[in-house]
Image (cartoon, rainbow, N blue to C red):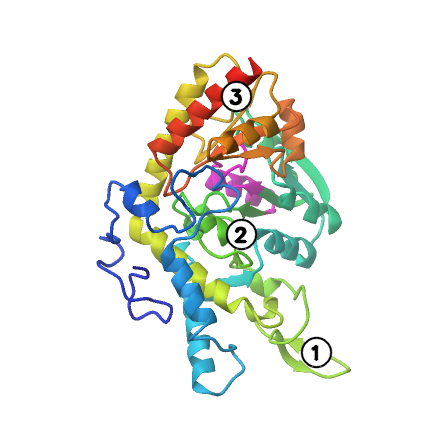
Amino acid sequence: MSNPNPSSPFASSEVEMPIGNARLRGVSTSLDTNGIRGQFPGLTPGWHYLDTAATAQKPQAVIDATVNAMGRNYATVHRGVYARSADMTLAYEAARRRIAGFIGAKEEQIAFVRGATEAINLVAYSHPKKGRVLLSVLEHHSNIVPWQLAGWQVDVCPLTADGCIDLDAAEKLLTPEHNMVAFAHVSNVLGSPLDVARAAELAHRVGAELLVDGCQAVPRLPVDVAALGCDYYVFSGHKLYGPTGVGVLWSDKLDTLPPWQGGGSMIDRVTFAKTTYAPAPTRFEAGTPAIVEAIGLAAAVDYVEAIGIDAIHAHECALVGSVREQLARKNSITLFGPENSAGIVSFAMAGVHPHDIGTILDESGVAIRAGHHCAQPLMEHLGVAATARASFGVYSNDDDVAALIDGLARVERIFG
């Protein structure tokens, strides 16, 4: 069970129906989570994994595609004249096309990077017009620190009362001095969704560009970069049920950026006097690329699309709604973020440090995240040192929710 496109170089054999009317073996259109969980070897019996916002577990289809690419199919790309190298090059570039199609892009607009962090660094350092960048209070450190290191002047957009980026405030803050706006599509702490199209319109109105951190959005929301109107869109593979060590930078402006790193593959001609560079996206993929990881990510895209991104989002919304409703009844619990948070619930318990919550939950087989979630400015805004965070994926179910609620009741008894 894997790629619904059997002609793809990274396809495996167990496919039942094509994308668009797809049903993976053991997966129904209503999300039979028992069947889905059986496809994830990391989800051992009795373990309730609620840390998908940090990294998603991997389905067997992705593992198989990765193992085959690293094993029986392995060779370098773009350089060998022998048949297996040519086949692997076809598979690698097919992965680029597959992932581009997933977000409504063209393949030449997709550069493979190590992750969203590297993608943001690439834009921050390579952009020819470093100036003022407007960030928001809820940004992940990877969408703050690169701009600072690259010498941009940082301005900060506040949040609404329910924890969303305040685009009315952004409209007032933006000036023609801003060259860039960089916002998260979905907050990794609060699950707050962004109206990307409006953010793009506001940025473009003053002549700025918009970079969107899509790490938390791509696994659960439909993304069409052309419809969104942004200038750069970045995401990491490992949060999309794919391998670590690979991510995507999309832009229809890649040709306007100079190379960020130098080395093999990204060149046209090298002399000691002068080097000329390959066109985008090749100029941004110096050295031997993440061949295996890119093929694994394409398999992850197939897996997600076969189930259906809308079905995944609806499933996660139901789980988030259930958790928020049950936690709201507890006087000891403070909930953070909007009611329509996407896949994520962050909370605090009076008198209990989130690390203690996480430790006690772990004793009950419940894995959550506890800490500042690489968002220290947001923690300061919330008035806490850290939060506890439960986050969901395609494999999460009502049993996970029940285990979380029961575990939190135990925390209350211990600290009561």
Decide: few, some or many residues near mark 3? Use Cα within 10 Å; few <14, some 14-19, many ≥20: some
Alpha-carbon span between mark 1 and mark 2: 28 Å
Q: Name the residue under label 2.
A: 234
Q: Mark 1 points at which residue?
A: 275
Q: Mark 3 points at which residue?
A: 411
Q: Which of marks 1 and 2 is nearer the N terminus?
A: 2
Please provide percent x and percent y for residue 406: 42, 23
**Closest to the observer, 124 or 54:** 54
Q: Which of marks 3 and 2 is nearer the N terminus?
A: 2
Q: Which of marks 1 and 3 is nearer the N terminus?
A: 1
Name the image quarter holding residue 360: top right
User: Which amino acid type is marked by label 2?
Assistant: Val
Q: What stretch is highlighted in magenta?
A: 183-209
**Closest to the observer, 382 or 255:** 382
Which residue does the image show at 25% across and 53% down from the upper left? Answer: 25
**Closest to the observer, 165 or 86:** 86
Of badges 1 and 2, nearer the viewer stands: 2
Residue 94 versus residue 224 in the image, above or below:
below
User: Which amino acid type is marked by label 3?
Assistant: Val
**Closest to the observer, 365 or 321:** 365
Q: In this view of the protein, can residue 205 be seen by the observer? A: no
